[in-house]
Every structure is written in structure tokens, then in C-alpha cells.
Image (tube, rainbow, N blue to C red):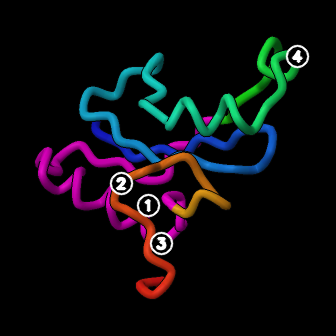
Amino acid sequence: MKWIYKLTFPNGKIYVGMDLTGSVGYFGSPHSPSIVADFTAEQRRDMTIRREIIWSSGTATDADVRAKEIEYIKTLRSSDPAIGYNRTPKFSPQAN
């Protein structure tokens, strides 16, 4: 199963990612420097991050899943630094 997931951090910011293998332990690569900047050292010691599967498919090609991920990143605006931790595609206020 392939899926698109959304991580929600304690501050409400999100990260959208994809998993082509359906691994329960995969949490992607959110922009770590931004996360470090948003939380104190003490807050980073104990935090809960929620992962939601927001789209899945047993038949989509890898290219289809990649396109769907970009679609969700744009729709949810998770590359807007005020909203999320995605860094690609680059956020453009004019495009949203």
C-alpha cells in the first residue's frame, strides 16, 4: 500500500509526506532546522506528533503518488513556513 500522510506537530504546524512501501515506522524528512527553531530544548525532550494517512492506494504508480504528494502540499500549504515544515515545492504566496 502506498500513501500520503500528514504529520501534525504540537504547535499545529504540519508536514506532508509520502510512503511508497506502507511502512508503519516511516515519518519522512520534515525540515529539522525549522523544528529546532520552533521548540525549546525542553519541549523537544517530550512531544507527541500525530501521523494521519490522508490518501492511500494499492494500485497507484510511484509517479502518481509523488504527484499526489505535491498536490496535498500545495492544497494544505505545508511549504508555507507559517503553516508547515515542507520546503518543496517552494512556497509562493501568489500561487496560493
User: Disc 3 residue type?
Assistant: Thr
Distance between the Cα atoms at labels 4 and 3? 32 Å
Task: Say whether marks 4 and 1 touch (CB < 8 Å).
Answer: no
Q: Classify 4 as above or below 22.
A: below
Q: Classify 40 as above or below 15.
A: above
Query: Picture coordinates of residue 9 (x, y %)?
Result: 71, 39
User: Which residue position is annotated with label 2?
Assistant: 88
Q: Nearer the viewer, residue 49 or 60?
A: 49
Please state the extent of the stretch shown in magenta in the rendering: 51-79
For label 4, the SS is helix
Say which quarter of the image contains residue 8. Answer: top right
Mark 2 or mark 3, which is nearer the start of the sequence? 3
For label 1, the SS is helix
Q: Is residue 73 magenta?
A: yes
Q: In the shown orientation, is residue 47 left or right of residue 80?
A: right
Specify few, some or many for label 2: CA neighbours under 10 Å numbering under 14, 14-19, or 20 or more: few
Query: Picture coordinates of residue 68 (x, y %)?
Result: 30, 60
Specify few, some or many for label 3: CA neighbours under 10 Å numbering under 14, 14-19, or 20 or more: few
Distance between the Cα atoms at labels 4 and 1? 29 Å
User: Which residue position is annotated with label 4?
Assistant: 42
Q: Is residue 74 magenta?
A: yes
Task: Say whether marks 2 and 1 touch (CB < 8 Å).
Answer: yes
Q: Nearer the viewer, residue 29 or 65?
A: 29
For label 3, the SS is helix
Distance between the Cα atoms at labels 2 and 4? 29 Å
User: Which residue position is annotated with label 3?
Assistant: 75
User: Which residue position is annotated with label 1?
Assistant: 73
User: Disc 2 residue type?
Assistant: Thr
Mark 4 or mark 2, which is nearer the start of the sequence? 4
Task: Say whether marks 1 and 3 touch (CB < 8 Å).
Answer: yes
- Nearest to the eye among marks 4 and 1: give it: 4
- Nearest to the eye among marks 2 and 1: give it: 2
